[in-house]
Image (tube, grey):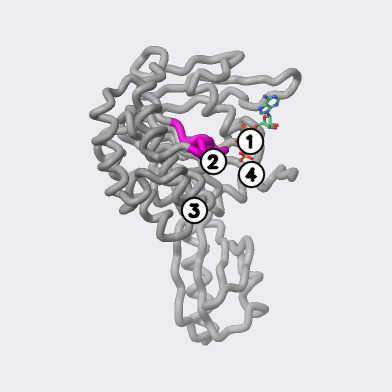
Amino acid sequence: MLELQRITKRFGDYTAVDDLSFKVPPGQIFGLLGANGAGKTTTFRMLLGLLRPNEGTITWKGEAIPLSKIGYLPEERGLYPKIRVDEQLVFLAELRGMRRKDAKASLDEWLDFFQIPQYKTMRVEQLSKGNQQKIQFISSVLHKPDLLILDEPFSGLDPVNVEQLKGAVRHLSSSGTTIVFSSHRMDHVEELCEYLAILDKGRPVVAGYLPDIKDSYGKANVLLTTDADASEWQHLPGILSVSQEAEGYKLQVASKGDADAILRQLVTSGARVERFMWEQLSLNDIFIEEVGKHYEP
Ligand code: ATP
């Protein structure tokens, strides 16, 4: 179990992380979200021991995190461009305490997983940006870490590579690796994580188990396709906002009961309702609501 207890990090007068607590059980994938500058990378640097919190404690299975057990994919990628993939990855794994033979075997497995065995003996500079990123991901997992920290792992990848990387993350999680990752892509987080925290200016504004977080918002969305003009129904009680979408309208409603009443009203008024679909708020809706309140670019 990874546990952060009341972590605060200040740079001079500026508080970059403010009283942050969360726990990640073994094998879980935890999403750390927040606008630019919210404190995600600072949190990761504290997890790695590169920065020391001013207050609070970080423990792994109740103790300080041993560095050899951590894998880290930094936001700014940092492989040596002139050195061959196999030479630098095996070297880095050896630095983390792995035997050369095991590092080579692990590298072959991961290159096969990503279907890129042909890059093994190439220099990093000869690879595309996306493939360099896959190589850097492999470098962060080669030594089989128990805790894997991924800072924006999907940025810059094409959709096929995003899916491959998601597959790798799920595979590691199912074999017991605990994973903490940051992303600005709410759909990726929603797909991969059950637990998450949203930071706003260093402060956690939402944290916990995603289904519980969603349940705690009474509000919901309704996807509506109807022949009735919006002016006829958009002022009905319980409708908080209306936006036009490709296949009709998306309404934010105050409660499920309001949604039922809106449907009854539409049908009673003789409108043809082709689609009336109730859905919980998406993570994107929650993020915009929580972070958008006091957003300053
Ligand atoms: P992004 O999504 O843009 O990567 P982030 O959530 O990772 O952002 P951080 O990099 O953790 O944000 O930065 C949080 C805040 O702390 C920012 O305002 C940043 O300028 C500030 N900060 C980070 N490192 C330092 C430092 N070494 N000295 C002073 N301020 C810093």
Ligand number 1: quarter of image: top right
- In the picture shown, does residue 280 fall above or below 30? below
For the image, the number of numbered tags is: 4
Q: Please report whichever mark, 4 or 1, sits nearer to the chain's N-terminal start.
A: 1
Q: CA distance from mark 4 to mark 3?
A: 34 Å
User: The residue tagged with tag 2: helix, strand or loop?
Assistant: strand
Contact flag, marks 3 and 1 (Cβ < 8 Å): no
Mark 4 close to ligand 1, CB under 8 Å: no
* Residue linked to disc 4: 291
* Residue linked to disc 3: 128
The residue closer to the viewer here, 144 or 28, is 144
Q: Please report whichever mark, 1 or 2, sits nearer to the chain's N-terminal start.
A: 2
Q: Amino acid at mark 3?
A: Ser
Point out which mark residue 296 bears. none
The residue closer to the viewer here, 218 or 145, is 145
* Residue linked to disc 2: 33
In which quadrant is the N terminus drawn? top left
Q: Which marked residue is nearer to the observer: mark 4 or mark 1?
A: 1
Find residue 199 and report its horizontal and vertical position in percent.
Answer: 58, 36
The residue at the point 53 percent across, 49 percent down is 155
Residue 42 seen in this snapshot: yes
Q: Please report whichever mark, 3 or 2, sits nearer to the chain's N-terminal start.
A: 2
